[in-house]
Image: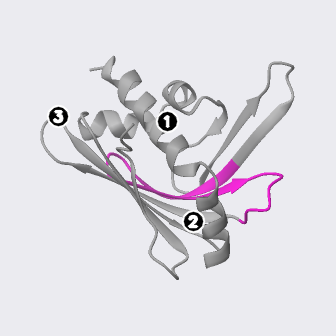
């Protein structure tokens, strides 16, 4: 399966650049990142908090069939410009990964297409490389495929 979500990891750098073009207007793509009901669907996780504003915060949580928490992430939103950008921290709880800084940029390409660019900055090159050892690219691509499918229904 082709990975439509592209990840550029330059050797020796502590960041990743992720890009994906969607067959969605930028307003709908942005909505998929800020509406809790939509985020829960494409990310497959529960949104406990999502304050879409400068100095806002968020918290996501995933539980198994027995109700045990298997994933929890949180962060602070540092900048929020509707339909254009979100700057936030991202921390996965109970993992060896340090907090990362994420710059999300939303760009209108045509009336019906848009592009998401995400720059993720890690504490070190080693931590970034550890993340790349995980099935990170495949998981992100699958999530973005779900985003496209779910948000298509909102058109």
Marks 1/2: CA–CA distance: 20 Å
Q: Residue 59: x percent and y percent?
A: 68, 42
Q: Marks 3 and 2: in contact by CB < 8 Å?
A: no
The correct choice, above or below, for 9 with respect to 141 in the image is: below
In the displayed structure, does residue 73 sit left or right of residue 81?
Answer: right
Whether the magenta-drawn stretch holds residue 139 is answered as: no
Q: Regarding mark 3 in the picture, which secondary structure is present there?
A: loop
Q: Give whichever of 120, 138 is nearer the camera.
A: 138
Q: Where is residue 132 in the image (x, y as percent from the top left)?
A: 58, 60
Q: Can residue 124 be seen in this view?
A: no
Residue at x 46% of width, y 69% of height? 9
Question: Which of the two labelled residues, at mark 1 and mark 3, occupies the earlier sequence position?
Answer: 3
Q: Is residue 123 above or below residue 26?
A: below
Q: Determine whether, in the image, residue 154 is placed left or right of residue 64.
A: left
Which sits earlier in the primary sequence, circle 1 or circle 2? Answer: 2
- Mark whose residue sits in front, 1 or 3: 1
Q: Which mark is residue 143?
A: 1
> For the residues marked 2 and 3, what is the alpha-carbon distance in whole angstroms?
29 Å
Which quadrant does the C terminus fall into? top left
Residue at which label 3 appears: 112
Residue depicted at x 39% and y 34%: 31
**The magenta stretch spans residue 86:** yes
The residue mark sitting in front, 1 or 2, is 1
Q: Give the range drawn in magenta.
A: 74-98
Horizontal arrangement in the rendering, residue 86 relative to residue 25 (left or right)? right
The quarter of the picture where the N terminus appears is top left
First in residue order: circle 2 vs circle 3: 2
Please state which of residues 36 and 13 is positioned toward the viewer in this rendering: 13
Between the residue at mark 1 and the residue at mark 3, the CA separation in whole angstroms equals 20 Å
Q: Determine which of the numbered discs, if any, sits on residue 101 in the image.
A: 2
Q: Which colour scheme is used?
A: one colour
């Amino acid at each position: 399966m082709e990975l439509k979500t592209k990840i550029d990891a330059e050797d020796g750098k502590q960041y990743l650049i992720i890009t994906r073009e969607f067959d969605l207007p930028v307003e709908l793509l942005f909505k998929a990142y800020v509406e809790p009901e939509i985020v829960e669907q494409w990310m497959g996780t529960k949104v406990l908090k999502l304050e879409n504003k400068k100095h806002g915060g968020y918290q996501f949580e995933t539980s198994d069939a027995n109700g045990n928490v298997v994933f929890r992430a949180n962060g602070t939103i540092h900048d929020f410009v509707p339909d254009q950008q979100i700057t936030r921290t991202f921390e996965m709880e109970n993992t060896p990964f340090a907090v990362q800084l994420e710059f999300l940029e939303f760009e209108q390409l045509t009336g019906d297409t848009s592009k998401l660019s995400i720059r993720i900055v890690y504490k070190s090159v080693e931590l970034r490389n550890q993340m790349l050892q995980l099935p990170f690219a495949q998981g992100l691509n699958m999530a973005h495929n779900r985003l496209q499918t779910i948000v298509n229904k909102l058109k």
